[in-house]
Amino acid sequence: MDRIRIIGGNRLNGVIPISGAKNAALPLMIASLLTKEKLVLDNVPRLSDVRQLSRILGNHGVDVTVAGKRNGQDGEIGQTLKLDAEMIVDTCAPYELVSTMRASFWVIAPLLARMGEARVSLPGGCAIGTRPVDLLLMALERLGATIEIEGGYAVAKAPAGGLKGAEIAFPKVTVGGTHTALMAAVLANGTTVLHNAAREPEVTDLAECLIKMGARIRGLGTATLEIDGVPRLSGAQHAVLPDRIETGTYAMAVAMTGGDVLLEGARADHLQAALDMIGQAGATIACNNEGIRVSRNGSLLEAVDVATDPFPGFPTDLQAQFMALMTQANGTSRIAETIFENRFMHVQELARLGAQIRLSGDIATVEGVARLKGAQVMATDLRASVSLVIAGLAAEGETMINRVYHLDRGFEQLETKLGRCGADVTRISG
Ligand code: EPZ
């Protein structure tokens, strides 16, 4: 199993090209199931989650081919995928495939909408909380589907005339629930209104792609989405939006180590809450046409309190990284996790590096300024793993990150991107 070795202490200087967003690429790929025609996606990050979803879609009969690489620095990030779902050969997504990636459960919506049925394994528990799918199923039921749970599978059937438009009010904001409802409603008969829909940029990216495919959706970027169903969708070409979580992660890495880095292609409007916090902590943030430039030269970091929230609030997917940053700040910072009930697995690993963090319910209290010292660490999820990477960049001596496969799920070319900016990061195979 690969490991990553970091020798901390180097400042970061240079340019980091931001990849396409994993959490937009996955639902976009799933949307290919909605049409018999080809969906071409540009700027898809080369990640293990993307490869795994390609296998899952392949099992349904989708022909997924890599058509080209992104033009850009060395052409080494991103790729173009062509997805051709002309023939759906199987409407079942089996446990062995779905259990490795939660987002694959979302195939239930396009399969149901286009084929009238789907049998999808319920996703398992996960290291960041229980993460149920009740709201996804509620949305499909509101559209007229009948759903039975049989042997660990959700078995969904559409009524004889197909799904029917409906009013769907989500009692809490759910990204997956909104993706699912959108993908089902675009082919339903009549109009669907989603209330309290997720406003995450990845939801808007999916809606924009669906519109290119012929869907009729109003209210993009707001909490109320209105969808007029159409009988069929066509093929389209769409570029995945830049990854705001990768952007925020590298911004925090620079704030942590000091230096000056341009996050090329990043979009500040997708990340304002986090950029404000990084700025309040003491880094300088400047946005221009090329991306976001983050620097810190000499100034001390100050403690800032943060609570995670659905977009446009501070993203839960940056909570672990911000906690790493706060270990180096002057003062005490309180970090509240309001989205997932158990997303603090990184706390004990950061403690191995010397961080001083107390946990009480959904609040972590971070005492800065801890002198971090390299150690062996491992993490149980993607964002927790990368928080250990950025802590390792600021720590004295050698940090060895185990279970690198978590990082490979969501960070394209991590060690190359950081290495080019002066970090001492090496992947050790085996
Ligand atoms: C998406 O997960 C992301 N995953 C997550 O990123 C992200 O942390 C999360 O949204 C929140 O922003 C992808 O896009 C692939 P939710 P999702 O439904 O859709 C509860 C990463 O590291 N809930 O918005 O699964 C749920 O338990 C991952 O890239 C229900 O109660 O998240 C949570 O408390 C981790 N019932 C809250 O809603 C449901 O049916 C928000 O979850 C569904 C969700």
Image: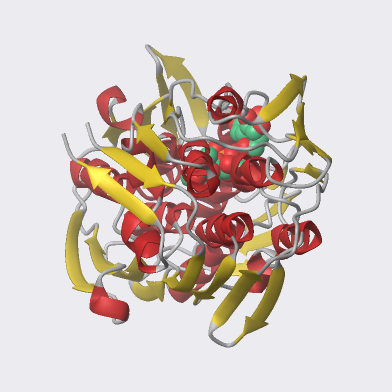
Q: Nearer the viewer, residue 199 or 45?
A: 45
Q: Residue at x 45, y 27 (%)?
A: 380
Ligand 1 found in image quarter: top right
Q: Nearer the viewer, residue 378 or 184?
A: 378
Q: Answer with the quarter of the image where residue 122 lies.
A: top left
- Up the image or down, 264 lies above or below 407; here it is below
Q: Residue at x 54, y 62 (%)?
A: 247
- Up the image or down, 387 lies above or below 30; here it is above
Image color mode? secondary structure
Query: Can see residue 66?
Result: yes
Tell me the quadrant of the picture where the N terminus can be found: top left
Q: Answer with the quarter of the image where residue 307 lies.
A: top right
- Up the image or down, 253 lies above or below 262; here it is above
Q: Residue furthest toward the bottom? A: 289
Query: Can see residue 142?
Result: no
Relative to 365, is 38 on the left or the right? left
Q: Residue at x 25, y 77 (%)?
A: 74
